[in-house]
Image: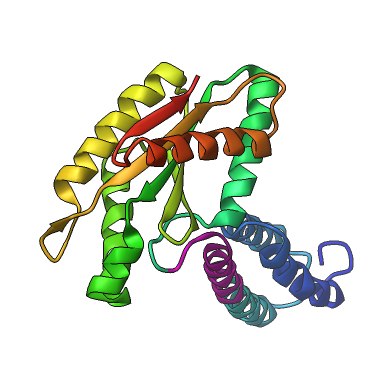
Amino acid sequence: ASVLGPPGQYWMYPALVGNFLLLGRNQALLLTASALVFLTVQGKAYDSRLQLVMFLVSASVTSMIAFVFASRTETQRQQLEALATLDPLTGTGNRRAMVRELQLAVESFKREGSVFGLAMLDLDHFKQVNDKHGHERGDGVLVDFAELIRKNTRKVDRCFRFGGEEFVLLMPGTDAEGLRVIDSHLREYIANKLRCCGEQVTVSIGAAALRKDEDWQSWLARADAALYCAKHEGRNCTVVDA
């Protein structure tokens, strides 16, 4: 537009739309505003003041439409990402998200030596809850359980629904000894707070700290084996694989 004059203005419209499709919205707004201000001050792209006003108005409307489109597209992307990674009932991460986070944890451990703890939590005799009180009540217990976990863990900890009444808790910066303390506290808190129709609901926990040269599958398997031991020992207890 600066070199060709008025005919070059037509190339500004695809450039303005492209800003919002290829860049972040704030970047696109800044770049668009800078371009329009530059052309206005430089003055070679217009033959008259009327032409300047008409171009600025039409370019602003085009930019506004592109901004709205980019905003709606970003919102829909975030919604689709949430649907793909969150459990719809409890709001915790799903198995897809869990696998991704465990892989990242293993890579971080290999690269930086970061410590990670992993716990598998299983509600005791949950089938009896569903059989006695119905699946709707059982779903309510799962929602309450997930909320108790969120309230009693750090923001950096990640909770995932592994399946049914089984959950996985990923805890960065937590070694085997830390797992014993944290998981025992969490188990006792749940035993005191979680109820279904006035009846106590407890949880069994198996945990394992990430080891050197271990992949996420074997790490998860050790936590699962520890959970099996916790159930074998009478449930409502914590076992940490040492």
Residue at image point 35% right, 42% down: 204
Q: Is residue 87 left or right of residue 138?
A: right
Q: Is residue 211 left or right of residue 86?
A: right
Q: Is residue 28 left or right of residue 242?
A: right
> Which sits in the foreground, 206 or 141?
206
Q: Is residue 200 left or right of residue 51?
A: left
Measured as percent of width and height from the top left, residue 125 is found at 32, 56
The residue positioned farthest toward the left in the image shown: 198
Q: Quadrant of residue 213 in the image?
A: top right
Q: Quadrant of residue 53 in the image?
A: bottom right
Measured as percent of width and height from the top left, residue 76 is found at 56, 72
Measured as percent of width and height from the top left, residue 146 is found at 33, 54
> Which sits in the foreground, 113 or 81?
113
The residue positioned farthest toward the right in the image shown: 4
Residue 73 colored magenta?
yes
For the N terminus, the quadrant is bottom right
Residue at image point 33% right, 60% down: 126
